[in-house]
Structure formats: structure tokens, C-alpha cells
Amino acid sequence: MRDQVDDILDQWRRERPDLDPSPMGVIGRLSRVTALISKELEANFARHGLTRPDFDVLATLRRSGPPFTLTVGRLQATMMISSGTTTHRVDRLEQQGFVIRTPDPADRRGVLVQLTPAGRTLVDEAVPTHVALEHALLADLPPDRRDALADLLRELLVSVSRARNLVR
């Protein structure tokens, strides 16, 4: 089985035999798969009136368990986004009535973000369709291959994360 990335690799090997383009096979495929999957996920979120960032905030709060409340810092760290991005996302969801902000009783300077009943209802409607879509996207991979892929991607994520911290 060949794909477009194989053609690209062949071209680089022909044009620059002095280089090993094999990493392009991994990165190129990851990029292409990410783009295809993102398109499908965005369409699913839109059916619920959400964007991917909206879903990320609501899902993060929902999976935190009752009372579905996190500090802004914890929310930011869990989603691996900047404070400005967190503020923008929370502002948007607060205006829509899906989250509320309250002072953090444990930290006078802190703020808690809590899922409202409307936010919980919305995310509880969106999560099953999200999970079903992810199952559909991976349906052609047998379970053992899916597990192996998840293991390899975990290794890659850890490796890239470590390398990124060392390079800074």
C-alpha cells in the first residue's frame, strides 16, 4: 500500500540522495492525518454549536468530576494553552451561559471556572457523538494495531516533549 507521502519520499531520495528523508514519512503522515481528522471533528462540534476550543474547555471541566470546577491555572495546564487563550475561551463560554467564574476561596487572587447545568447538558450531548466519530475514524484498524499505534504515538509524544524542553 502506497500513499502520497511515499511519492514525496521517492522524489527527495532521487533529488537529494545525500539526505535521509525518512522522518518526513512520519511527520508528513501525522500532518496529513491530523488535517483530515480535524476537519471531521470540527464538523461534529459544529453540529452541537461548538468549536473545538469550546469543546476542549467544556470536556476538561466535565471530566474533572463534580463539582465540575477547576482553577484557571489548572484548566490552562490541563489544556496546555496560554493564560490569554484560556481567558478568551472562558469569556466566550461564560457569555453563552456554559461556564461561570467565581473567586477561589483558597486563593484570593485566583478564579474558579465551573460548568453550568447548560454547559454540562451540552457537553454530555457532544461527547457521545465525538467518541462515536473517533471510533468510526479508526474502524479500519484492528484493535491490536490501534493499541500499537497508540503506544507508538505515546512514545513519540514523550520523546518530542523531552527534546523540546532540552532545545529551548
Image: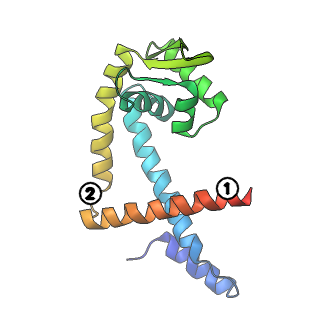
Pointer 1 local density, CA inside 10 Å: few below 14, some 14–19, many at least 20: few
Q: Measure the alpha-carbon separation of dots 2 and 1.
A: 35 Å
* Residue position marked by numbered label 2 in the rendering: 139
SS at badge 1: helix
**Mark 2 touching mark 1, by CB under 8 A?**
no
Q: Quadrant of residue 167?
A: bottom right
Left or right, residue 108 beside residue 29 = right
Seen in the picture, residue 36 relative to 140 is either above or below; the reply is above
Residue displayed at 60% across by 18% down: 110
* Residue position marked by numbered label 1 in the rendering: 165
Image quadrant in which the N terminus is located: bottom left
Residue 68 coordinates in the image, percent (x, y): 39, 23
Q: Nearer the viewer, mark 2 or mark 1?
A: 1
Q: Amino acid at mark 2?
A: Ala
Residue displayed at 48% across by 53% down: 34
The answer, for residue 142, to whether it is visible in the render is no
Residue displayed at 31% across by 56% down: 138
Seen in the picture, residue 73 relative to 22 is either above or below; the reply is above
